Image: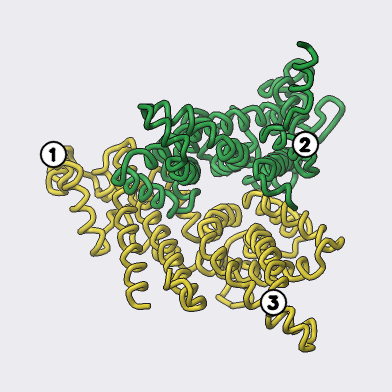
Chain colours: A yellow, B green
Amino acid sequence: MLTYLLRRVGIGLLMLVALTVLVFILLRLAPGDPVTAYINPSVPMSPEAIEALRVRLGLDQPLPVQYFAWLSAAVTGDFGYSIQRGGAAVLPLVFDRIGPTLLLMAAGLTIAIIVGVATGIISAVRRNSATDVGLSVVASLGISSPAFLTALLGLYFFAVQLRIAPSGGMLTPGAPFSIGDLLAHLILPASLLAIGHAALIMRYMRSSLLEVLNQDYVRTARAKGVKEFWVIVKHATRNALLPVITLIGSTIGVAIGGAIFLESVFNWPGMGLLLVNAVNARDYPVIMCATLVIGACVILVNLLTDITYAAVDPRIQVS
Amino acid sequence: MSAITQTTSAPRATGPLRRALGRFFTNRAAMIGLLIFVPILVAVLTYQWWWPLGPNAIDLTALNKGPSSKHWLGSDGVGRDVFARLLQGGRTSLLVATTSVVISTVIGFLVGAFAAFGGRFADGTSMRLVDLAMTLPPIIFLLVLASIAGTGIAPTIFVISLLSWPVLARMVRARLLELRERDFVVAARGMGAGVPHLLFRHGLPNCIDIIVVYATLQIANAILLEAGLSFLGLGIAPPEASWGNMLNLARSTIVLEQYPWQWMFAGGALVLTVLAINFIGDGLRDAFDPRSDLN
């Protein structure tokens, strides 16, 4: 178990380093002078001073040297200054946005898991019934609709037509903080984020459960007189959930993609909105830092999934 | 003479391709997909001959007007016909999608072939690169690349093609690795066939099923990526029409609330097309899988 863990962590770290190289190279290919990233835009500077800064920052050095200089600064938390936001340091800017995004994604994922697993079980148990066909059609639609479209439609129907949900933001501006206010703002974007994911989970859950229901131990459970409800819930579902766990881990990237669109439609102050605004303004230091933080999160989630899976299924370590 | 040729040709055994086509054309979902997709494709490609209004023609008597007999799907804020823009937008979306899929298929096949035939080192390096490219959520990569490439049709095609090849490369590699050990390939090698011959004479025909299925499903994916980028204002920029940048209009609260026809039809067309292509792709996948006859 320990060697397995160490190997997974090692691979994760290597991936992270490779990611920094890749993002670094990509952003150096970008048009514009990287030195602007280090100048505080609110302080005027002469061309000589900029040249001196370029030498001091090592931007006259070859790329690999620059990379290691950047990396050693980044490790201490120095990601430069935002070009767009009046020269604010990048790292706190990005860190402030992690909380809201995590909140949105956690809420969305919770809804998706509950709805997806429940409908998947119903579909599998009532296989080929009208309910099953109906749910499958809805799931197909859910998978094919892009997040930005469901976001717009949700906003249109629930916030504009029915006026039962606020149309954006995380809190009512000016009002004192309250959990109820936060939840009221959270529920619509989180549910919309959940749609695509719930559809995926439902499909997986359905086929996984159908497979498990054919197993011998399910027949044994039925034969010894266990009530059908408990056969499904206790014997079948628990085993059918295994592949679903992997699915949830491996589609975290899809969820992040969805979150970006929902944040930008609902003006949710998270990483996605920050990144989109930074890309629009070509604010490279912010893009770099945000990309790395997101990449690191994805690598971490994949690592956790691997570990959870190994903990749940002992066969994994052997192979 | 004629009797002999008849007897030898009459009970012609159905080849794998014919059987696959047979499976495809009896797949109900795939047929529904074709039934939706073909009319959309024809309409999008031929609209300039039967629809009187151009996508950028301005009608100052109809600013933000709802659907009418002249403008079937209404008009937008500067008096352009929404139906014409929808059709032109479909043309842009399909152009971007197919071009980028062709490019990424070529890259994917070549990288996969390089990994399979280039020796251990080439294999290790290219597959780690593929792993890395698959770590980041695609949309994040898309945003980073878009920030470098800028907006417009060519940069969008570039960005999407650069992003889509890793999955195919991995599938092609697996197939070629398996093929490399097969007797007919070993024999061809023994007779002195070079890598290009092996690759294009034996490799490509035996990967064609993977490539066709991948390319079909990837077109749907590319349409969504293009729409997503344009929706965020990073893909196809106005006045060029695309489904994504028509949806982008809805980011203005007034358009979202009061002129739903300006964005809803684009959204509908997008979902319908993607759904249809996915049905066709799934049908092709089942058709190419010989085991699906058993079910």
The reply to whether callout 3 and callout 2 are in contact (CB within 8 Å) is no
Which dot, 1 or 2, sits closer to the camera? Answer: 2
Which dot, 3 or 2, sits closer to the camera? Answer: 3
- Please state the horizontal and vertical placement of residue B205, each as a whole percent of the image: 54, 31
User: SS of the residue at dot 2?
Assistant: helix
- Please state the horizontal and vertical placement of residue A290, each as a whole percent of the image: 39, 56
Badge 3 and badge 2 both on one subunit: no
The CA span between labels 3 and 2 is: 37 Å
User: SS of the residue at dot 1?
Assistant: helix
Badge 1 and badge 3 both on one subunit: yes
Image quarter of the N terminus of chain A:
bottom left
Badge 1 and badge 2 both on one subunit: no
Specify few, some or many for label 3: CA neighbours under 10 Å numbering under 14, 14-19, or 20 or more: few
Q: Is residue A14 left or right of residue A180?
A: left
Q: Is A232 located above or below residue B157 in the figure?
A: below
The residue singled out by tag 3 in the image is: A216
Using the rendered view, name the quadrant where residue B264 is placed: top right
Of residues A178 and B240, the one nearer the viewer is: B240
At label 2, the amino acid type is Phe
Q: Is A211 located above or below residue A176 in the figure?
A: above
What label sits on residue B25 in the rendered view? 2
What label sits on residue B24 in the rendered view? none
